[in-house]
Image (spheres, grey):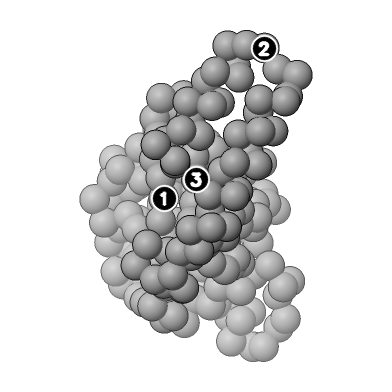
Amino acid sequence: MNEDNRMARRYHWLSKDLDSFVCEPHSAICCDKKNKVINLVALESSKARETVAGLSREKPKNILKDLKKIKDLQEKSYTLPIRHHIRLNDMDFRRMEKIFISTYEKKPENFEKLLAMKGVGPKTIRALALISELIYGVKYSIKDPARFSFAHGGKDSIPYPVDRESYNRSIEILHNAVKDSKIGRTEKIKAIKRLSFFYG
């Protein structure tokens, strides 16, 4: 939930073919607008995940020193590249220090373990991701994983009521496309079964 614009994303978590919770785990993300994001679960963010986990094991004073460098740049009105839309003004450095003391003491072995630590939340991860890129040059993905958004409306009429006719027509088009496709019989049956979930 984004408290600033009162918008929520819906994540559909299907773990049948899940290989990793931290690398491309999404099956579907429903959102009616795309945003600038720090997408650390993208495949191209693999090195950034390693760097963020590595930074979390550093001495807190080193991490805070790097954050202060970035904050000073922002406060002096240096223009950071457009992809760096995150401001550090809203970060409580004292609270961050406590979290970094904890990560330094527990030394999470990887990104997944870091995410599971008590107290580590979005601000901690954003701060470490910024250091990763701006200080160490390790880029993360800013590609929003949300692809499709309310093509037929929402069941609660937000952003608008479901257009049943268009909804059913879309399913029929997809069904016919699968039927006429040149894929194997087994794949075709699986695809039609998945589609049948939507039209009973």
Q: Is residue 63 left or right of residue 117?
A: right
Q: Is residue 137 left or right of residue 127?
A: right
- Total tally of numbered discs in the picture: 3
- Identify the image quadrant of residue 69: bottom right
- Identify the image quadrant of residue 13: top left
The amino acid type, in three-letter code, at marker 2 is Gly
Expressed as whole percent of the image width and height from the top left, the position of residue 98 reads 27, 61
Q: Is residue 177 visible?
A: yes
Q: Is residue 195 left or right of residue 85?
A: left
- Identify the image quadrant of residue 6: bottom left
Q: Which residue is mark 1?
A: 11
The amino acid type, in three-letter code, at marker 1 is Tyr
Mark 3 lies on a secondary structure that is strand
Expressed as whole percent of the image width and height from the top left, the position of residue 79 reads 72, 81
Q: Which mark is residue 190?
A: none
Mark 2 lies on a secondary structure that is loop
Mark 1 lies on a secondary structure that is strand
Residue positioned 60% across, 65% down in the render:
34
Within 10 Å of the Cα at label 2, are there few (<14), some (14-19), or many (20+) other Cα atoms?
few
Within 10 Å of the Cα at label 3, are there few (<14), some (14-19), or many (20+) other Cα atoms?
some
Give the position of the C terminus as an image quadrant.
Answer: top left
Q: Earlier in the sequence, mark 3 or mark 1?
A: 1
Q: Residue furthest front?
A: 165
Q: Which residue is mark 2?
A: 184
Question: Disc 2 and disc 3: Cα gap in Å?
Answer: 25 Å
Q: Are the two marked residues, 3 and 1, in contact with CB atoms closer than 8 angstroms?
A: yes
Q: Is residue 126 visible?
A: no
The amino acid type, in three-letter code, at marker 3 is Ala
Expressed as whole percent of the image width and height from the top left, the position of residue 89 reads 47, 82
Q: Which residue is mark 3?
A: 28
